[in-house]
Image: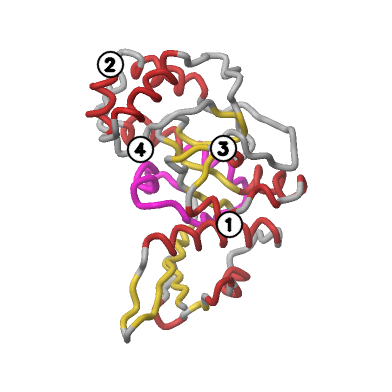
Amino acid sequence: MLILLSPAKSLDFKRTIKTNIASTPEFIKDANSIAAELRKYSVRQLKNLMGISNNLAERNFERYMNWNNANKNAESKQAIRAFIGEAYRGLNAQEMSEKDLLFAQDHLRILSGLYGILRPLDAIQPYRLEMGTKIEIGEFKNLYRFWDNKITDSINKALGNSKTVINLASNEYFKSINKNKLKANIITPEFREYKNGVIKIITVYAKNARGQMTNFIIKNKIEDPEPLKAFDIDGYQFDVNSSNENKWSFVR
């Protein structure tokens, strides 16, 4: 069973986790090619390309100008350590044991606009590049075209004999996968809130719950989807009436 998670826009390279193990991203050469393309952009062009502030554009201009192709930037840290945001607050990697983190290394993949796909302990350099960014890379019109087959082949390889993907990524990132080539049954958990007689998804809560479910899988070393129905953190309950084979609904 393989879990898919989105990255986070925000990074914190000062946090610590309970292992010094750091691996090399599978598609580091491709990441270097994309970084080389981004080095051609001025601060203003990066601002317009990414829809970010002047300060963020300047910071990312410096990041790409200082990019190290050997991935040995002094700030390089494990992906699960560097990403912050609601999903990663729910994931709470800094409280995981080394045994937990090694289980995550085998069972969790983080989709990335720059790196394509990351294992949790893959060392990354500071960057910002969302999958939906409209940038041409060589013959490819956008990052979705650039990554789809590479990401899909990587997931198929990582699945091994398992045939289940737990999709806890956002739509923006899950679209990067070629579903026709993916050799797996896809289960997408959805987290909904019941308020004033209406059941709806509230994005900030859903993101946190995706991270908490990832933590639940890792901490309990779950390798089969059925036990996920017991997920009840923060009051969520599996709702059989609003679920189907591929979309599992959790409501609170």
Q: Position of residue 45 (x, y in %)?
A: 24, 22
Q: Is residue 133 left or right of residue 63?
A: left
Q: Secondary structure at mark 1?
A: helix
Q: Amino acid at mark 4?
A: Met
Residue kind at label 1, given as amino acid type: Thr
| Label 1 with label 2: CB-CB less than 8 Å | no
| Closer mark to the observer between disc 3 and disc 1 | 3
Say if the magenta span includes residue 175.
yes
Tell me if 52 is positioned left or right of 162 in this view.
left
Q: Residue at x 47, y 56 (%)?
A: 168
> Looking at the image, which is closer to me, 181 or 193?
193
Q: Which residues are magenta?
A: 153-182
Mark 3 and mark 2 residues within 8 Å of each other at the beta carbon: no
> What whole-number distance in Å separates the C-alpha atoms at marks 1 and 2?
38 Å
> Which residue has dot 4 on it?
131
Residue denoted by label 3 = 82
Q: Earlier in the sequence, mark 3 or mark 1?
A: 3
| Residue 214 disc label | 1
Between 240 and 127, the one lying in front of the other is 127
- List the residue tagged with mark 2: 42
Q: Earlier in the sequence, mark 4 or mark 2?
A: 2
Q: Tell which circle, 4 or 3, labels the residue nearer the N-terminal end.
A: 3
C-alpha separation, residue under disc 4 versus residue under disc 3: 18 Å
Name the image quarter holding the N terminus: bottom right
